[in-house]
């Protein structure tokens, strides 16, 4: 996966398939990845939480 929209689509698709809802633990998190990897986009976002072995991020203020 090499695009931000691709990661976002996977996250949204996973939520739809599992019936997941918004979680107060991750707040406005829009992106996530396993802690064992470091995607190129991770440095451009604000880290909001780490749950288990997954790191969650949201856009920085002013980003879309």
Image (tube, rainbow, N blue to C red):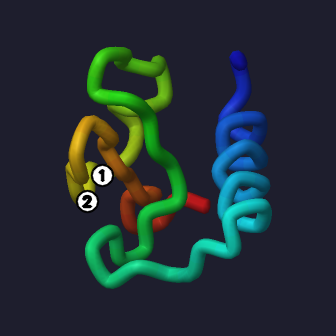
Seen in the picture, residue 16 relative to 56 is either above or below; the reply is: below
Between 56 and 52, the residue placed more toward the observer is: 52
* Coordinates of residue 62 in the picture (x, y in percent): 47, 66
Q: Is residue 17 left or right of residue 22?
A: right
Label 2 element class? strand
Residue at point 77% right, 67% down? 16
The label on residue 46 is: 1
Pointers 1 and 2 in contact (C-beta within 8 Å): yes
Q: Quadrant of the N terminus?
A: top right
Bin the neighbour count of mark 2 within 10 Å (Cα to Cα): few under 14, some 14-19, many 20 and up.
some
Between 59 and 55, the residue placed more toward the observer is: 55
Residue farthest along the front direction in this orientation: 18
The CA span between labels 1 and 2 is 6 Å
Seen in the picture, residue 34 relative to 14 is either above or below; the reply is: above
Between 39 and 14, the residue placed more toward the observer is: 14
The label on residue 48 is: 2
Between 61 and 2, the residue placed more toward the observer is: 2
* Coordinates of residue 12 in the picture (x, y in percent): 72, 59
Foreground tag (1 vs 2)? 2
């Amino acid at each position: 996966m090499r695009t931000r929209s691709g990661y976002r689509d996977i996250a949204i698709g996973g939520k739809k398939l599992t019936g997941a809802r918004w979680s107060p633990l991750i707040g406005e998190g829009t992106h996530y990845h396993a802690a064992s990897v470091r995607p190129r986009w991770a440095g451009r976002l604000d880290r909001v939480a780490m749950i288990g072995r997954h790191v969650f991020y949201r856009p920085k203020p002013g980003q879309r």
